[in-house]
Amino acid sequence: MVIVKGLIPVRDNLRESAVALAQQLARQARDEEGCLAYEVYLKADSPRVIMLWQQWTDLDALERHFESDYLDDFLDRIPDMIDGEVHSLHFDVTEDGEEAPAGQTVTTLADGTTLH
């Protein structure tokens, strides 16, 4: 599974429009094969920051998402709404007993959490 977390700071006066645009993106992405979750949140301590939380079955599914026309539309429309630096993180996650992707180092913490 692949998890993606994106943080998008937006202009206060455009927050509602930016959230609506992100929600539209999420609705479309949820219909994609391989999309397990696509959520839109506002940060409680910084409500002008939109957080996109995505879960995909694998990297291939995420890459197909990157090729979608509606993601291109989102990326064309969101820049004028941004106010600050956009951050994105992506994590490859394995289930218990599942092999890590080739070439990745795996660390298991005392509580059983696996880091890649």
Image: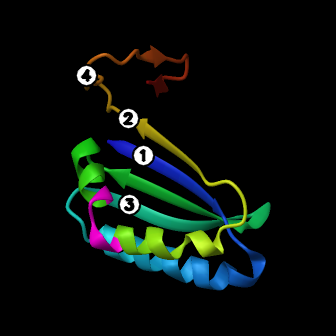
Q: Residue at x 28, y 43 (%)?
A: 59
Alpha carbon separation for disc pair 3 and 4: 23 Å
Q: Label 4 sits on what residue type?
A: Glu
Residue drawn 22% across and 46% down? 60
Residue to which mark 4 is pinned? 99
The residues bearing labels 2 and 4 have C-alpha atoms spaced at a distance of: 10 Å
**Residue 24, percent across and down?**
43, 80
* Marks 2/1: CA–CA distance: 7 Å
**Compared with residue 23, is residue 51 higher up or lower down, i.e. above or below?**
above
* Circle nearer the N terminus (1, 3): 1
Sooner in the amino-acid sequence: mark 2 or mark 4: 2
**Range shown magenta:** 66-70
Residue 92 in the image: above or below residue 11: above
**Residue that badge 3 annotates:** 37
Task: Label 2, secondary structure: give it.
Answer: loop
Question: Quarter of the image holding residue 97?
Answer: top left
* Left or right of 3, for residue 60: left
Q: Are marks 2 and 4 in contact (CB under 8 Å)?
A: no
Residue 3: assigned label: 1
Identify the mark nearer the N-term, 1 or 4. Answer: 1
Measured as percent of width and height from the top left, residue 104 is found at 36, 18
Q: Indicate the quadrant containing the N terminus: top left, top right, bottom left or bottom right.
A: top left
